[in-house]
């Protein structure tokens, strides 16, 4: 048994040793018997200059290494350290390839022992971590990481992380470890060897069973869960008297805080929500930043649910807010209330794992690397999850493909009783039946209006948080979309017979029934059908791209476009596309019928099927249902008559891969009124942005409410904006619409550079179009003026919105460039954000398909499209953007608006009136920078 681990980290001049890149710093930490026993590090003279970007990354300069030893001088020491040890590193193949090259050049054999990768280990052992960079994991595990990208500091942190990972691994149940061992032969490192050594140790200690776990069906180790499904004590008790007075509220709410400050706005909101439900009225509440909105509605909801023995649904737009409510607000509510409240988070069925399908998938072999890693992640995750919800997991794109095989769905062939008892989806559904508060998202809330069987129990009262999104989500929910990548991936699951995928498996199952096979379409016939379908799908998306190309306006070097589709225009391209859609839909119908016929034959012999065959059949049924859904989508988009707005979104650089067809209603007010608001007794919509120029009229109309029967309430933010914000408007920029994109970008880039130097970064710059963002980013980079700033740009720097935000907060001098989704939902409190720049007023482009269609309808009805739609929509987005700047009462910030229309046009005043009153100064950039220096 190897009991020595050497954790290595290198800094190098680049990433290719074969092209002459060299090591500039070597560090190793030795671990023996679970303890760090030795550390060694040395700078190394690479005999070439260190590139500027490596200097910036590592802080190591030519001057520092010029008197350092050559690698050949420390090679004997390095070789002796590695003798008889595991080689451990964070991204091991990088460090090993460099070291191998240098050791061989120094006359040694190189290292050929066992290797372990802490990235790979962390992905398996921490399947829910936000990220797997060393700095992310150091923060997660609370490890001191003083000098990232210096080898000695990185090696020390990697060694401490490695000890944590090994410890966590050795605490896993033996069943899980044996399953991990079987799978780990497919990894890049020698983790199998380490796991087998841990299993051996456990056997000698006679087991490591945990009280918190249970073995299900002799197949999977799961965390024991406390079921909340016992009926809640919804019996009315005297304890449910709603605290009407301010004094009662203060007495109650302060129980949840160590130091409590009274928020009058929050109390007003509590009364508003309680009154809305009590009187059975739909209500809109705009609550400014800092009101404490979540508690403002949760407390009255809890009382109302208990008093009336009814569930109340709380719906949000984002997963982040759902998690914040469940993890922060509900525990706070529990401290405050004098009675117990049952709450449950409910998501769509496919969010939950099917334990039965996963158990069957473990028996399958011939996995690719991503699938192997994902199976290992899930095995570990099952020992710690209470929910079985995939949003907890950090999966790779390959992992997401595997999830489709094991997601929870209606089953026909399988569903063993024992699995049913442990099923996460059924448990969530049962808990919802007995809950007082059900937390969900807008899409699931809307599924209640169209699905025959809704996941949500019957409800009459709801809170819709982030309510300014509700109309848009409803439009997407009622609409349809088709995209190339999803469609291709779906069809490729079935494959042709010789590809040995689902079709091949289906035929094997039929053949296993031997003489029981009845006449149906021949294998060869279906094989041809699959080939035709694949060809027609490619044709269909090629014709979609061709239509977009021939009907898009002059592109002026822009790569992305949204092109409206109409049955009345488009000539031969349109006809070819519609005919292709018809052929595509017919072929999908034929394949679905052929699969259904085979499944009916197999169903008659259900009892003679093995578990493995049942598992495969569930995958095939799932595929059949999905191609039927696809067929309906194609029909609704191209063949059925409808008033939907239809358009194509395309990236001309890789047309096929990024082509999506959309069909959505222009207005959803009538549908929402008829199918949602008229059925529910009391719905409260809340958000920080529901009013335009202090009026709710626009929002009321958009979502289908009636002005005379809807209550409204505005609760201002408690923040002192007059002393926390300065609004600056540069007068030396050109008018945004009176100059070319290139010239405008040159002007604003100069201003951004000047402002960034004054604010020392800490800037969020909001754009309305990605092309302008990209050109600005490239010009700033090219200028070289901000080389010592971390430049983070949406759509250019990789990562999700929350990851980009975290990176922004990590650097002292950072600039974050964002488009649409960054106008809201980004929370950067404190000094991390000191300056918000709004490049142009956020009007939707007039040729954007939905905007164009809405404006058309308004004009046809004799209305004014600008004042009734374009302006209010832009004002709401502007308010969202403004809300990014001040997140706490201690924040201070500069708001810089580059678009002069805010002061030169009549409608500009409407933008200013819709945000809190703040001091405004106009001037040239030098005058404004003076103000910034004095003020920040």
Image: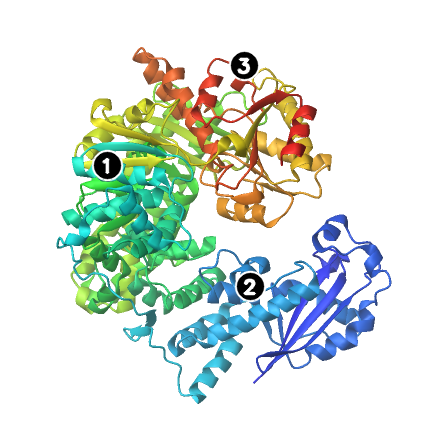
View extreme (right): residue: 67
Q: Earlier in the sequence, mark 3 or mark 1?
A: 1
The answer to whether residue 426 is left or right of residue 81 is left
Left or right, residue 365 beside residue 194: left
Q: Which residue is mark 3?
A: 904
Residues 712 and 243: in front is: 243
Return the disc, 2 or 3, that comes first in the chain's sequence.
Answer: 2
Residue 206 is situated, as x and y percent measured from the top left of the image, at 40, 88
281 or 548, nearer to the observer: 281
For residue 636, say whether it is visible: yes
Q: Is residue 651 above or below residue 356?
A: above
Disc 3 from disc 1: Cα separation: 40 Å
Please say if 416 is above or below 627.
below
Q: Earlier in the sequence, mark 1 or mark 2?
A: 2
For the residue pair 911 and 1, the one nearer the viewer reads as: 911
Q: Which residue is mark 2?
A: 119
């Amino acid at each position: 048994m190897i009991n020595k681990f050497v954790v290595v980290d290198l800094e190098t001049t680049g990433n290719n040793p074969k092209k002459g890149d060299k090591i500039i710093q070597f560090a190793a930490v030795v671990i023996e018997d679970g303890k760090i026993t030795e550390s060694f590090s040395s700078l190394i003279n690479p005999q070439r200059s260190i590139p500027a970007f490596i200097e910036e990354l590592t802080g190591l300069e030519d001057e520092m290494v010029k008197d350092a030893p050559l690698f050949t001088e420390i090679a004997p020491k390095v070789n002796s350290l590695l003798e008889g040890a595991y080689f451990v590193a964070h991204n091991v193949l990088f460090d090993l390839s460099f070291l191998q090259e240098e050791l061989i050049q120094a006359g040694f054999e190189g290292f050929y022992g066992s290797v372990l990768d802490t990235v790979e280990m962390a992905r398996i052992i921490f399947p829910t971590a936000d990220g797997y960079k060393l700095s992310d994991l150091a923060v997660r595990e609370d490890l001191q990481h003083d000098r990232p990208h210096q080898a000695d500091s990185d090696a020390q942190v990697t060694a401490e992380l490695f000890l944590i990972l090994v410890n966590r691994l050795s605490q896993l149940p033996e069943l899980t470890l044996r399953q991990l061992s079987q799978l780990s032969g497919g990894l890049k490192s020698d983790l199998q060897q380490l796991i087998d050594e841990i299993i051996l140790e456990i056997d000698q200690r006679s087991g490591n069973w945990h009280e918190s776990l249970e073995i299900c069906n002799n197949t999977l180790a799961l965390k024991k869960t406390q079921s909340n499904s016992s009926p809640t004590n919804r019996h009315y008790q005297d304890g449910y008297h709603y605290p009407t007075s301010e004094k009662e509220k203060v007495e109650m709410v302060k129980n949840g805080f160590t130091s409590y400050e009274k928020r009058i706005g929050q109390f007003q909101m509590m009364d508003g929500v309680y009154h809305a439900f009590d009187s059975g009225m739909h209500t809109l509440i705009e609550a400014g930043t800092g009101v404490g909105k979540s508690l403002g509605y949760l407390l009255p909801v809890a009382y109302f649910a208990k008093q009336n023995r009814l569930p109340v649904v709380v719906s949000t737009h984002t997963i982040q807010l759902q998690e914040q409510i469940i993890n922060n607000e509900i525990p706070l509510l529990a401290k405050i209330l004098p009675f117990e409240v049952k709450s449950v988070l409910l998501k769509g069925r496919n969010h939950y794992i099917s334990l039965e399908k996963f158990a069957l998938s473990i028996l399958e072999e011939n996995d690719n690397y991503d699938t192997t890693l994902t199976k290992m992640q899930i095995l570990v995750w099952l020992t710690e999850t209470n929910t079985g919800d995939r949003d907890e997991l950090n999966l790779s794109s390959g992992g997401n493909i595997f999830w489709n095989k094991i997601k929870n769905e209606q089953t026909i062939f399988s569903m063993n009783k024992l699995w049913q008892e442990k099923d996460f989806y059924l448990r969530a559904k049962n808990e919802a039946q007995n809950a007082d508060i059900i937390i969900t998202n807008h899409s699931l809330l809307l599924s209640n209006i169209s699905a025959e069987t809704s996941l949500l129990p019957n409800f009459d009262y709801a809170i819709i948080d982030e309510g300014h999104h509700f109309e848009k989500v409803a439009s997407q929910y009622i609409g349809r979309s088709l995209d190339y990548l999803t469609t291709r991936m779906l069809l490729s699951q079935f494959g042709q017979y010789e590809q040995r995928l689902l079709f091949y498996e289906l035929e094997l199952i039929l053949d296993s029934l031997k003489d029981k096979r009845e006449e149906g379409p021949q294998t060869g016939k279906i094989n041809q059908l699959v080939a035709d379908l694949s060809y027609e799908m490619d044709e269909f998306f090629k014709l979609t791209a061709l239509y977009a190309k021939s009907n898009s306006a002059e592109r002026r070097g822009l790569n992305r476009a949204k092109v409206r589709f109409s049955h009345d225009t488009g000539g031969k391209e349109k006809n070819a596309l519609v005919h292709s859609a018809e052929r595509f839909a017919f072929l999908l119908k034929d394949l679905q019928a052929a699969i259904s016929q085979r499944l009916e034959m197999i169903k008659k012999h259900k009892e003679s099927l093995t578990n493995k065959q049942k598992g495969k059949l569930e995958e095939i049924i799932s595929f059949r249902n999905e191609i039927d859904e696809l067929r309906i989508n194609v029909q609704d988009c191209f063949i059925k008559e409808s008033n939907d707005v239809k358009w194509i979104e395309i990236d001309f650089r890789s047309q096929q891969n990024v082509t999506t067809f959309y069909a959505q209603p222009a207005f959803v007010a009538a549908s929402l009124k008829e199918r949602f608001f008229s059925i529910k007794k009391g719905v409260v919509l809340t958000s920080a942005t529901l009013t335009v120029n202090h009026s709710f009229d626009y929002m009321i109309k958009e979502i289908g409410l009636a002005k005379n029967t809807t209550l409204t309430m505005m609760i201002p933010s408690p923040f002192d904006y007059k002393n926390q914000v300065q609004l600056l408007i540069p007068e030396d920029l050109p008018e945004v619409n009176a100059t070319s994109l290139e010239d405008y970008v040159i002007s604003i880039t100069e201003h951004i550079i000047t402002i960034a130097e004054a604010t020392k970064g800490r800037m969020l710059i909001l754009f309305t179009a990605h092309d302008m963002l990209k050109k600005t980013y490239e010009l700033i980079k090219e200028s070289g003026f901000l080389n010592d700033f971390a430049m983070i740009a949406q759509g250019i720097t990789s990562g999700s919105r929350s990851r980009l935000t975290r990176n922004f907060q990590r650097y002292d001098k950072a600039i974050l460039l964002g488009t649409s989704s960054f106008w809201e939902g980004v929370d950067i409190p404190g000094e991390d954000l000191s300056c918000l720049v709004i490049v142009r007023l956020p009007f939707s482009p007039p040729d954007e398909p939905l905007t164009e269609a809405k404006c058309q309808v308004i004009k046809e009805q004799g209305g004014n499209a600008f004042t009734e739609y374009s302006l209010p929509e832009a004002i709401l987005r502007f308010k969202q953007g403004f809300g990014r700047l001040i997140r706490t009462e201690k924040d201070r910030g500069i708001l810089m608006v580059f678009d002069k229309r805010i002061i030169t046009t009549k409608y500009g005043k409407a933008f200013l009136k819709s945000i809190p009153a703040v001091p405004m100064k106009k001037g040239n950039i030098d005058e404004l920078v003076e103000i910034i220096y004095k003020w920040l």
